[in-house]
Image: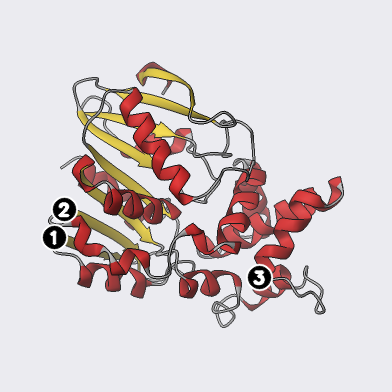
Amino acid sequence: MQDNIIEKGLLEVSNLHKIYYEVCGNINGDCYLFVHGGPGAGFSENDKRFFDFKRHKVIFFDQRGSSRSKPFGCIEENNTPYLVDDINKLLNHLNIDKINIFGGSWGTTLSLVYAILNPERVNSLLLRAIFLGDKKSIDHFTNGDIKDKYPKELNRFKNNVPLDSSLKISEYYLDKMLNGTDEDKEFYSYEWAFYEISIFKRSLSDQEIDTIIKQIPYHSLSILEAHYLSNNCFIEENFIIKNTDKLGNIPVTIIHGEKDLICPIEYAQELHEKLNNSILYIEDAGHSDTEPTIENRIISFLNE
């Protein structure tokens, strides 16, 4: 993959934050911005598999505090409006006026908010696993709506919070990850990531979950997810659904797993119904983009 990198570096987006980015592929190809999930997950080499670098020019970047961006795991000056501004700063730095955007999970939230606020800079949206960033979506993930399918995993996640705590689950985890002992920080970072990975793909063993966690920057993932979910993703309630008209006739392609327990299918259906120019593909899959039907649909779409 390294041979496909046209440019890479750290872009200073504030006095505090620098975001890591790579530009890959054909310098004259169809231009895409890849918006990773989490928040906090960063992009990986594996994310590059979706693109044909002979045809595509793709910008990958780690959002504030994520993965290779600096400072790592930092929640200061880290919210959705800042991330939207960072995308504009990155596009301006690369002299790109208008772009296609591909985002997954939290990446769909940020992609949609960006496009609503900057429709003139967006050619199209490709969205995998819609997360609307509203209270319903957040409560579903952190507060037990998956208990019928994953009771053991949910109990493990919730039982790390004392019954007498006045904090929400995400707030308690975040406090421990930021202010606890070194053991607390490691334990709660791991447990947050374990919970998410345990429900994002069907039939994973504990050993498989551990292997996946060890391959990702799970400390930034856990800290920033808890930070954003504790603050309603720093967007007005129902912001995306209320403002779909701002997207005009931007083509939107939605790919969603029918059995997605992190982002239930109704989120995708609700968004699809509100848009003027969208296509919805419902696949026999869960949340992960590594599930064959989702992976194949993305690759097929990008390489039509």
Q: Earlier in the sequence, mark 1 or mark 3?
A: 3
**Circle 2 sits in a helix, a strand or a loop, which is it?**
loop
Asked whether the residues under the numbered discs 3 and 2 touch, taking CB atoms below 8 Å apart as contact, a structural biologist would say no
Question: Does 127 sit above or below residue 27?
Answer: below
Residue 202, percent across and down? 51, 65
Q: Quadrant of the C terminus?
A: top left
> Which color scheme does this rendered protein use?
secondary structure
Q: Is residue 93 visible?
A: yes
Q: Which residue lies at the image location 64% right of the left edge and 41% below the top edge?
A: 74
**Corner quadrant of residue 239:** bottom left
Q: Disc 2 marks which amino acid?
A: Pro
Callout 3: few (<14), some (14-19), or many (20+) C-alpha neighbours within 10 Å?
A: some
Residue 62, percent across and down? 49, 36
Asked whether the residues under the numbered discs 2 and 1 touch, taking CB atoms below 8 Å apart as contact, a structural biologist would say yes
Task: Name the disc covering residue 251, or none.
Answer: 2
Q: Disc 3 marks which amino acid?
A: Glu
Q: Which residue is mark 1?
A: 277
Separation (CA) of disc 2 from disc 1? 5 Å
Q: Which residue is mark 3?
A: 153
- Quick one: 165 or 37, which is closer to the camera? 165
**Circle 3 sits in a helix, a strand or a loop, which is it?**
helix
